Amino acid sequence: MSPSEIKLPDYRSLAPAVAARFERIRERPVILSVRDLKKSFGANGSTHVVFDHLSLEIHRREFICAVGPSGCGKSTLARIVAGLDEASGGEILLNGESVAGPGPDRGMVFQGYTLFPWLTVKRNVMFGLQMSGKAPSTADTEARQWLDMVGLSKFEESYPHELSGGMKQRVAIARALANNPRILIMDEPFGALDAQTRAQMQNYLLQIWKKVDVTILFITHDLDEAAFLSDRIIVMGVNPGGIREVIENPVPRPRSPAQFISPEFLALKKRLEHHIHPPVEGEPAEKLPMIKLTDAGDEVE
Ligand SMILES: Nc1ncnc2c1ncn2[C@@H]1O[C@H](COP(=O)(O)OP(=O)(O)O)[C@@H](O)[C@H]1O
Ligand SMILES: [Mg+2]
């Protein structure tokens, strides 16, 4: 069975609110336009093409998740959009203007904790503001507002090593948003967190996104996470690399963990799973040789 044969519930008839949401999104201006993007690594002889002819349009305040198997080029795409890596072909337009190289119009949050360990939480958030020429007093006020937004006002004088992983990522989000980017690019930002903290962070992120005029490109390999957060999901593949499908997420907003067992959520996940872990024919896993190293007598199944 191909992924497209897994029918998603027709949200147009099922949930008019979901259909209306997509109509509203399509009416908003395009913030990020990726045109015919190509990336290859290696010199002439052994060139590895990660993807080619990758095109995509993201509207203002849209929440896009990109999923795909390891090595399909998710981070490569994120890095090129962020201007940290150069494309081998094609073009990136932000607000209609071609961009190359990093800029304050794009914020980035990675999986690894990237705060400056020698600066306090507040000074970490102030850093970019002062780099862009803001007076220390303005940077101070704005940094406090952002820390308030992510619920960390009480920790402004703490150092990163005094914070939990989830709190560090909230500071990283505040720091990225403080520069007022048009787009926030997040590459597996919650990948290193335990399941419970991760769920909390997803919840925080949705609350923050509601309050800020920012478009989000969120890379993840966690299908639940993509289904919980996104408006649309870009499914990427390998050999050949590129976008396999762009799926409109039929799960209504506001999202809650209770929806994890809703028919829309389950159908969406099943379709994503078919892309990423296609069912294998035959034996599910190779049998290991039967060598017994216990004679304790307490047999296990
Ligand atoms: N600097 C590099 N040099 C050579 N190959 C690279 C480099 N960065 C990434 N690649 C290759 O590009 C492909 C995509 O990598 P990546 O974007 O990290 O995938 P993902 O984030 O989806 O796991 C992989 O095959 C990887 O080996
Ligand atoms: Mg990656």
Image: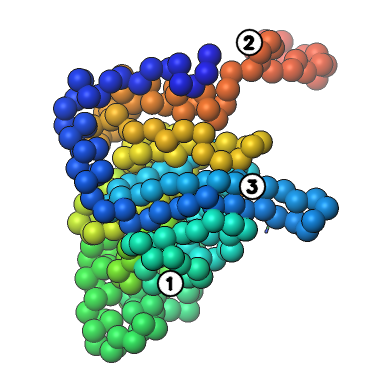
Q: Is 221 located above or below residue 280 in the figure? A: below
Residue shown at 46%/21% (left/top)? Answer: 4
Quote the CA–CA distance across marks 2 and 3.
44 Å
Residue shown at 78%/58% (left/top)? Answer: 43
Disc number placed over residue 12 in the picture, else none: none
Residue 164 can be seen in this image:
no
Mark 3 and mark 2 in contact (Cβ < 8 Å)?
A: no
Residue shown at 58%/63% (left/top)? Answer: 85
**Sequence-earlier tag: 3 or 1:** 3
Mark 3: C-beta under 8 Å from nearest atom of ligand 1: yes
Mark 2: C-beta under 8 Å from nearest atom of ligand 1: no
Q: Amino acid at mark 1?
A: Gly
**Sequence-earlier tag: 2 or 1:** 1
The residue that disc 1 covers is: 103
Disc number placed over residue 301 in the picture, else none: 2
Q: Which secondary structure lies at badge 2? A: loop
Residue shown at 26%/68% (left/top)? Answer: 146
The residue that disc 3 covers is: 50
Quote the CA–CA distance across marks 3 and 1.
24 Å
Tell which of 54 and 2 is nearer to you.
Answer: 54
Q: Amino acid at mark 2?
A: Glu
Q: Which secondary structure lies at badge 3? A: strand
As drawn, is 297 to the left or to the right of 244? right
Image x and y of residue 144, in percent: 24, 74
Q: Is 26 located above or below residue 14 in the figure? A: below
Residue 6 can be seen in this image:
yes
**Sequence-earlier tag: 2 or 3:** 3
Mark 1 and mark 2 in contact (Cβ < 8 Å)?
A: no
Quarter of the rendering occupied by the C terminus: top right
Image color mode? rainbow
